[in-house]
Amino acid sequence: MSENYFKDVYLKRINHGGTNRQDRIKSRKEIEFDRLFLKNTEYLVNLLEVNDEKVNVKGSLQPNKWNENSLIGNLLMSTSAAPLKTGDVLYIKQTIKKRIIEKYWIIIYKDDNLTKGHQLYKIICLDTEINLIDEYGNSIHAAPAKFINASQSFMQDTIIRNAKELGYREPFTTRIIIT
């Protein structure tokens, strides 16, 4: 084996997935997520907009384990996609059994653990729209929003826990608007 072959071919081939065991496992998980999981998931979504900017990214929007009424979800995306931030507003299109659902969502928590091979975000569905109108009744601006009252304490506790704020919540006194 010549010296050039060793450097040019063999080292590139042996270090294809990374230079150590941890990097090779991580790259294998990323490849499995992209090639196997995203193609076979029933929760496949297309991310169309991020903060009113057009994008086209595929992901998986899975219902939350505790609240499966699709108001809170887990968004799984490939690590090759641009990372999103807490507070980003997403416009997501999902097809479930020939039914197309298009909704706005907001990111409330980002999991920074990339060793799983994917990016994980906790998101809330923005199911209401706030319209700002002028004195003549013309709409100036419309923004998606989520109204939360004290009876929806699960979402409230999730937001507070993810924001790492400790505090006492009086029952039936708090109103939150997420925009």
Image (cartoon, grey):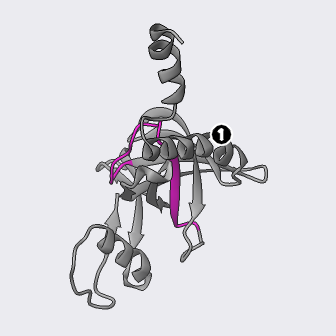
The answer to whether residue 140 is seen in the rendering is yes
Quick check: 27 above or below 110? above
Mark 1 falls on what kind of element? Answer: helix
Three-letter amino acid code of the residue under disc 1: Arg
Q: Quadrant of the C terminus?
A: bottom left
Viewer-side residue, 4 vs 145: 4
Q: Residue furthest front?
A: 1
Viewer-side residue, 88 vs 78: 78
Q: Residue at x 51, y 40 (%)?
A: 27
**Magenta extent:** 70-88
Q: Residues within 10 Å of mark 1 (few under 14, many from 20)?
A: few
The answer to whether residue 78 is seen in the rendering is no
Viewer-side residue, 32 vs 56: 32
Q: Residue at x 44, y 56 (%)?
A: 121
Is 10 positioned to the left or the right of 43 in the image? left
Say if the magenta span includes residue 80.
yes
Say if the magenta span includes residue 133.
no
Q: Residue at x 43, y 80 (%)?
A: 154
Pointer 1: what residue?
35
Picture mark count: 1
Q: Main secondary structure of the magenta part?
A: loop
Q: Quadrant of the N terminus?
A: top right
Q: Position of residue 8 (x, y in %)?
A: 47, 13
Q: Position of residue 152 (x, y in %)?
A: 43, 80
